[in-house]
Image (cartoon, grey):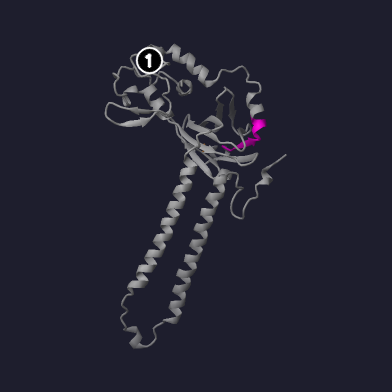
Amino acid sequence: MSLITSFPATTFMPIQATEIAKEVDLLYAFLLVSSLISFVILIGGMTWFLIKFKRTTDEQKSAYITHNNFAEFMWSFIPLIILLVIFYWGMVIFEKLRVPPTDVAAEIHVTAEQWAWTYKYANGKEFYSSGNDPLIVPAGKATKLVLTSKDVIHSFYVPAFRTKQDAVPGRYSQLWFQPTLPGEFIVFCTEYCGTKHSGMMIKIKALPAEEYAAWYHAEKKGADTPADKGKVLFAQKACASCHSIDGTKIVGPTMKGLYENKRKFVDGSEAKADENYLRESILVSSAKVVEGYPPAMPLFQGQLSDEEVEHLIEYIKTIK
Ligand code: CUA
């Protein structure tokens, strides 16, 4: 049951598998058509003038041409308006592409490495794919990917969704999409990452929502979730001796309701406690010291693996 056929490809473009893809293509078509019209007016007009106003007599050749204020204003002003429209239009689409909706149905951690991807689901399901296992997501619902890399920079590009995002070592980036219908869609790595860069291709498989739910809850291979592993680490690393999980103030700030919360720092700056903030604060807590607390936390850089940091963050995200 290949459903790819339910998305007709347009003349120039891959299939449009999200609503945003249609908007991106419309803007692209506008750019193409307005460029074509400008080209015809500009080059056509120039050619026509060359022929019509060719100077032949000596009198014509020595004539001095002054300027025309109105014409000069219009050929600057009209393109300015068109460019501003393109800018605003692009900005609106860009924002939709970058900001995930609040009701995300699936959050999947995607780790890139030379030359494969690993997907980790919130319930502990985990796949390593150098091309065969597809990344399974629900169709008709929003999926958010949290991307990072183990080695060099890679980039996760889904042509059918018209979206891409770099996977950078040492930090998290995010990408979201909502496939309109079930189907299989190709993912390319679009950042040159070594010998097998071009082979770093996988597929996203969007399943109907009920099928996805059944797949998601099916046999878990007894694995702990990343958050479960984080909870164990939280105890092992004695995090709890300084950070409460119930809102009580001990030595350091509580972990309760921390994720996505606004933090105020001793230097007066502010930041939202997203994945990157949590990562930095776990590894090098002195980078941003929360107002009202001493800079007492030891350095964990080099003490925790990327995976352990990820598990801790997933645990902290559950403490609400
Ligand atoms: Cu990974 Cu290119």
- Amino acid type, residue under disc 1 in the picture: Thr
* First to last magenta residue range: 200-212
**In the image, is residue 202 part of the stretch drawn in magenta?**
yes
Res. 308 in view? no
73 vs 108, left or right, is: left
Nearest the camera: 109 or 80? 80
Q: Is residue 25 above or below residue 270?
A: below
Relative to 107, is 239 above or below?
A: above
Residue behind mark 1:
248
Q: Is residue 19 visible?
A: yes
Residue occupying image coordinates x 48% and y 31%: 149
> Residue at the location (44% across, 48% down)?
91
Decide: is 204 above or below 11.
Answer: above
Q: Position of residue 157 (x, y in %)?
A: 53, 41
Quick check: 246 left or right of 101?
Answer: left
Above or below: residue 101 compared with residue 8: above
**Secondary structure found at label 1:** loop
Q: Position of residue 181 (x, y in %)?
A: 64, 41
Local crowd at mark 1 within 10 Å, few (<14), some, or many (≥20)?
few
In the image, taking residue 142 as reference, residue 39 lies left or right, namely left
Tell me where residue 119 appears, x and y as whole percent: 56, 29
Q: Quadrant of residue 279?
A: top left
Rendering coords of residue 316 (x, y %) = 45, 21
